[in-house]
Image (tube, rainbow, N blue to C red):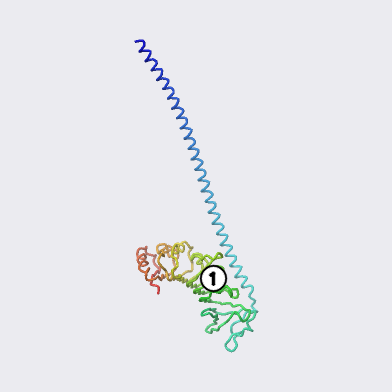
Amino acid sequence: MEKRQKEYADTILILQNEKKTLKAEVEDATRALQKSNEALKNEQKLKNEMAAKILECQTQITRLKETVAEQKEQINVMEKIQKEASELLIIDPTQTCNLADVIVNNKIAYERLNGKVLLVDDLQYSDGKWSVWSKVHKYPISFEHSDFKIFPQFEFDVTNNQNLSSVLNRIVCSNLKDLYLFKITIPFCDYKKLTGNKISCLYLYDLIVYDEYGIKVKIDKLWKEIKNVKSLTHKFTDNESMHEIAQKLAELAPFPNLKWLYLENVQDGFDLQAFYQFLIKNTKVACTIKCSGESLKQMKKARKEMPKLPKGHYFHIVEYK
């Protein structure tokens, strides 16, 4: 009996020791868990602080980008004003002349033009030849005969001239009202000189404009140069990618004077739903879209699914022929 009691006592003692050991291990594990949780909390706090700092930096970068963009826009406007002013300043009234001053025997007498600035109503290039207009009279003209400049007062019309840059420095563009550019490729700096902010009517047909890196300039950048335009016709080149065009146009600021807009040769991929936002922004515009027969049905179907435009809007989709 005593032996059995001793065995029980020993067993109880062993169990008590194991309990103490287990309790110590649990306490150690608890303390380790607490430390781990604290470390995790600190780590999460650091992550949150880093995320906040990153967000703050991103916000500052966005603001800086917006500031830089605004400053660039201001610089562009100033440069444009300076160019226009310089063009006007260099024109000495005593050096200007009209067609009546240089026409002899129904032809231009180039010896009378040398060193002069010729004031004309319209300047045109087609079929490989230049011509000038004054009221109802038209005369062929060549830049090769003498050193002179031409100052078109109203219209400049260029068709299929791939060497326009070579003579553009002899054309004063500061007073243009109507500009027609057909099937030509020009650098963006020439496009900016031609358009300016005074253009009232602009016609762009199969026009390709490239930047200083030889990359084609997108439509939204072209349209940003013509903020005061009243009538705009833009014909897309064959197989031109329509991807994102409508979206980029919808992102543009409204055109306060735009009354007539014609988009021609619109092809598959043009997002009519996105373009709807452009129409909403420009409340005065009457818009006509001309698209190929293949996409005409799709465009008209998309038109029916669009919300109705506010009263007074004119929007028409027709077949491009």
Q: Amino acid at mark 1?
A: Ile
The tally of labels here is 1
Dividing the picture into quadrants, the one containing residue 250 is bottom left
Asked if 137 appears above or below 205 in the picture, the reply is below
Tell which residue pokes out farthest to the front in this image: 3
Image quadrant containing the N terminus: top left
User: Is residue 290 or residue 63 the one in the foreground?
Assistant: 290
Q: Secondary structure at mark 1?
A: strand
Dividing the picture into quadrants, the one containing residue 108 is bottom right
| Residue 92 x, y percent position in the rendering | 65, 76
CA neighbours of label 1 inside 10 A, class few (<14), some (14 to 19), many (20+): some
Residue at horizontal 36 percent and vertical 11 percent from the top: 3
Asked if 23 appears above or below 309 in the picture, the reply is above
| Residue 228 x, y percent position in the rendering | 51, 68
> Which residue is the site of mark 1?
186
Tell which residue pokes out farthest to the bottom in this image: 105
| Residue 232 x, y percent position in the rendering | 47, 71
User: Is residue 128 or residue 271 the one in the foreground?
Assistant: 128
Tell which residue pokes out farthest to the top in this image: 2
Residue at horizontal 37 percent and vertical 14 percent from the top: 7
Image quadrant containing the C terminus: bottom left
